[in-house]
Amino acid sequence: MRLAPHWRVRAQRLQLRGEVCQCCGERLFPPRDVCPACHQPADKPFAFCGEGTVYSFSTVYEAPKGYERFAPYTIALVRLKEGPLVTAQLTDIDPADVRIGLPVEMVTRVLREEGEDGMVIYGYKFRPLLEREVAGTEARE
Amino acid sequence: MRDVSIIGIGQIEVGEHWDVSLRDLGARALLAALADAGIDRPDALYVGNMLSGTLGSQEQLATLIADWSGLRGIEALKVEAACASGAAALRVGVMAVAGGIHEIVAVLGVEKMTDLDGEEATAALMTAADAEYEGIHGTSFISLNALLMRRYMEEMGVPQEAFAGFPINAHANAVNNPNAMFRQPITRDTYSRAPMIADPINLFDSAPICDGAAAVILCPTERAREFSSRPVRIAASAVATDSVALHDRRDPLFLSAVQASALKAYRQAGIGPEEIDLFELHDAFSIIAALSLEACGFAPRGEGTRLAADGEIGPRGRLPICTMGGLKARGHPVGATGIYQVVEATLQLRGLAGANQVPGARWAMTQNIGGVGGTAITHILEGQG
C-alpha cells in the first residue's frame, strides 16, 4: 500500500491547488518549483476555480486494473478557465454526449480502488457545468 | 569529435517469441551484428530497453546480456528513454566513439513484452506517461494518443479515413520483410471496418505488442573499411525533449521535441528535409506519423495525412517512410524499435533492402519517440557507395 504518494498531492487532488508564477504570471497546474514559461522559481499557491471546457476526449472501454468499475469512462483534456490543460475523467455524462468545447466543472470523486483491504483514492473529475451556472456565465459576459 | 560509422547489423524476427527469453533474444541479435562486422569483442555494450524491470523483474540487463553473449567483463550499461530507449542507446554509443572513449561499440535494442498478458503490457506502457497526473486518472497510453487524434481531426478538419494511408503503406512494405510481424497487406476497406480500440484510434492505427531485438556495431569512420565493405556513416545524432505530460504543452498538436531534434540533425548532417531519401518514422499510432511529418518539415501543419493519401510515402514515392513495415507492421518491441529502424535504414543504404529498395538511396533519417513526444531522437545516416 502506497500512502505517501497520494497524501502529498492531496491539495492538488482535492482542491485543484496549483501555483501562479510571481515573475511572469503564468498559472501552473500541477505546481512545480520552476516556472516552465520563464524558468524562475514558482512558489505562490493558486486555487483554480474548477471550471473549464473539454479540449479533447477519448472513452476507455477496457479499463486498467483499479478502474474497472468506472468503465466505460471518458478521459478528457480540460482547458481550465485560467489557462492550463488538465487530464481527468469526465463523470455524470454519457460518453456519447461528450463533445469538444463542452463546459465542465470540477467535482471530487473516487479515482481508484485498490481492493477490499486497499485504499480508496479520491480526486478531481469533471462533470458538465450545471445549466444555471452556464446561464449565469453568459449573463456576466 | 570523430566521425562514426555502422560496420555491422543484426536483427531477430519481430513476433511472439514464447520459446526465447529476453536475454537470449538480446544475445542472438548482438552476436549476429558482431558476426556481420567480424568483431569478437567490442569495447562496450549499450542496451536500449524500456520494460525489463516492469515486465521481467530484471534489471542490470546489459550486464546480463554481455555475459550471455560471451562478453563478460566489458563495459555494459542499459539506457532508458521509454519507447525511444533503442535510439537513446545508439546516441550513447555514438558519443562514446565520437568522443574517443571507445573504438568499437555494440548497441542493442531488446524488448520482451509477451511473457505477461496484454493488460499488464498495456499498464507497463503507461509508465512512459506522467504517473501522478495522467496515469492516476485511469488513462491508458492508447487513450493519450486518442486525445491527440480527436483534437487533430477537429482542429484540422481531417476525417479518420485520411489516416488509412499510413497502415496501408506499412503493411504493404512488411510483406517483403522476413523480419516483420504482420506480413499481410491491408486495404482501405479493411481499415474502415476495423474495430475501435480507443475511439478514434482503431486496430490498424496502433502498433502491436511483441518481442524483438536488433543490434548495430559502431567504430570511427576512418577505420570502418577495415571491418565492412559497405559501412554507413552516422551523419547526425540528436536528442530533444518536451514535457512528459500532454497537458503541460502549450499546443499539444505540435511535437516540439520532434521538430527540435530534426532541426539539430539537419544542421549536423548539413542537409535539409528535401534531401532525405527515406524516413523511418515512429508510427506507433497513425496520428504520430502525421504529426512527425509535419514537425520535421515534410508537410505543412494539418496536412501530414495528405502525403499518405497521395501515395508519396511508398518505396518509390517522393518520401518513402516505414520502408520495411514501420512500427505498425514490422512491429514495435518498444526498446528495440529504435535499433530496428537503424538496421533497416542501413539495409537501404547498403542496397540490400530487396523488393522494398529505395532506388539510389543515399540519405536515410530515423526517428524514435519516447512517450507522446516527450523524448525525440533523430539520426541521419549516409551511405558510402
Image (spheres, coloured by chain):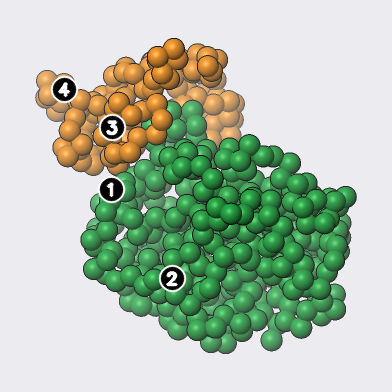
Chain colours: A orange, B green
Q: Residues within 10 Å of mark 3 (few under 14, many from 20)?
A: some
The answer to which quarter of the image holds residue B183 is bottom left
Left or right of B249: which side holds B40? right
Q: Nearer the viewer, mark 4 or mark 1?
A: 1
Residue hosting label 3: A71
Q: CA distance from mark 3 to mark 2?
A: 34 Å
x then y, percent, for residue B24: 68, 55
Classify A49 as above or below B267: above
Mark 4 and mark 3 lie on one chain; the one further toward the N terminus is: 3
Q: Secondary structure at mark 1?
A: loop
Classify B278 as above or below A109: below
The answer to which quarter of the image holds residue B119 is top left
3 and 2 marks in contact (CB < 8 Å): no
2 and 4 marks in contact (CB < 8 Å): no
Amino acid at dot 3: Ala
Residue hosting label 2: B183
Residue hosting label 4: A130
In the picture, which quadrant includes the N terminus of chain B? Answer: bottom right
Q: CA distance from mark 3 to mark 1?
A: 14 Å
- Of all chains, the one bearing label 2 is B
Residue hosting label 1: B199
Q: Nearer the viewer, mark 4 or mark 3?
A: 3
- Of all chains, the one bearing label 3 is A
Classify B194 as above or below B371: below
